[in-house]
Structures are given as structure tokens and as C-alpha cells.
Image: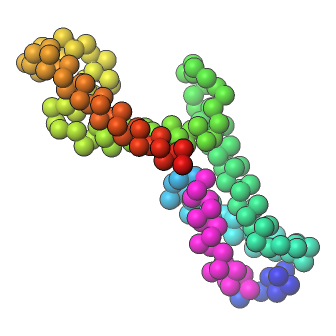
Amino acid sequence: MEELAKGSREAFRELYMFYYPKVRYFIFGLLKCDEETDDLTQEVFIKLWTNRERFNEVNSFGSYLYVLAKHTSLNFIEYKQIRSDNLNKQRPTEDDSTTPYEELVARDLQLLVDMVVENMPVQRRKIYRLSRESGMSNADIAEQLNLSKKTVENHLNMALKELKNAMSLLLILYLC
């Protein structure tokens, strides 16, 4: 720590090599995004280098580093939230009291829905998108695709069942 406080690049390199994987793993657990995780991990080590003179006062470097990583991550999440809020001010929202964790869950859920829909058979995927994304009625979908209304309903039921099963797995993962 004394060497780092004096500006030793070798001391910094050793700390970087030892702690980088641990800090990255910790930040990834908060963000769940590789690109943002890499950027924030680099930011933590930049802050570490810029404030190196303070390390003579630090009792537990590992604790200090994880607190720095946590605060950097939470500040980033808050910044993204504020930026997102500013972009969405024109749109009315149902509930403005979402937490960063809820946003992460919602993003994971949307990703899961997109993946499940992409892996559906072509006809089912087309019917699901016309119904849920375009807002068409079953009768209109049946007419547009030259299918019976019952066929459209069956495809939608199967699509919703697939989504329900996938969401059940996601729920189990978040509860564990």
C-alpha cells in the first residue's frame, strides 16, 4: 500500500492483476451486462490510481476496494435511472417508484420473452407478434393469415404457455 501511495506502477499492476477478476465479478453481479461491467471495473481502478495517496490511511484494502466498486456501480445505476427518467418525462408512467433491482429484473424478463418468441415456430411467432405487438384481434389475424380463428387461438395459447414456462424458470432463479 505504501508503494502504491508513492505512485509505484508495479504495485498498482500487482493489485490490478490480483483484484480485477474479483471486482469484475462483483460488479457483474449488480449490472448483469458485460460491456457496462468492463467499463465500470476500469473506472474503479482509475479511481484507485487517482486517489492512491490516500492508501496510507486505509486499514483494509480489500474492503475499501469493494466499497469503491459498490458505490461506483450504484452511482452508475442511479445515473442511468435519472437519464432514463429524463428521456421518458414526456411519456406517462404507471409507477415511478421502481428500484434499480426491479429495472434489472424487468430487463432480464424482456430479454427472456424476446428469446422465447424468437425460438417459436414461424407461424406461432407471427401470430403472437400480430396479437401482442400489433394489437390485432384474433379474428383480424385469422383473416390476414387465411387461418381459422380457432387455429389462431391455439397458436396464441401455445405461445403463452411457452412464455409462462420460461418465466417460471426465471422466477425460480431470482428466488434462489
Is 54 in front, or is 137? 137
> Does 33 appear above or below 143?
below
Q: Residue furthest right?
A: 57
Q: Residue furthest left?
A: 146
Q: Position of residue 126 (x, y in %)?
A: 20, 30
Q: Name which residue lies at 23% across and 29% down.
A: 158
Q: Indicate whether residue 13 is drawn in magenta.
A: yes
Instruction: Please name the colour scheme applied to the rendered image.
Output: rainbow
Is 18 placed left or right of 172 in the picture?
A: right
Q: Name which residue lies at 69% across and 70% down.
A: 45
Q: Position of residue 75 (x, y in %)?
A: 71, 49
Q: Name which residue lies at 47% across and 40% down.
A: 171
Is 157 in front, or is 89? 157
Is 165 placed left or right of 124 in the picture?
A: right
> Does 65 appear above or below 143?
below
Q: Name which residue lies at 36% across and 40% down.
A: 166
Among the 4 quarters of the image, the one containing residue 129: top left
Q: The N terminus lies in which quarter of the figure?
A: bottom right
Among the 4 quarters of the image, the one containing residue 142: top left
Which span is picked out in magenta? 11-30
Is 124 placed left or right of 85 in the picture?
A: left
Q: Can residue 142 be seen from the camera position used here?
A: no
Main secondary structure type of the part rendered in magenta: helix
> Does 83 appear above or below 51?
above
Q: Indicate whether residue 97 is drawn in magenta.
A: no
Q: Can residue 175 be seen from the camera position used here?
A: yes
Is 30 placed left or right of 56 in the picture?
A: left
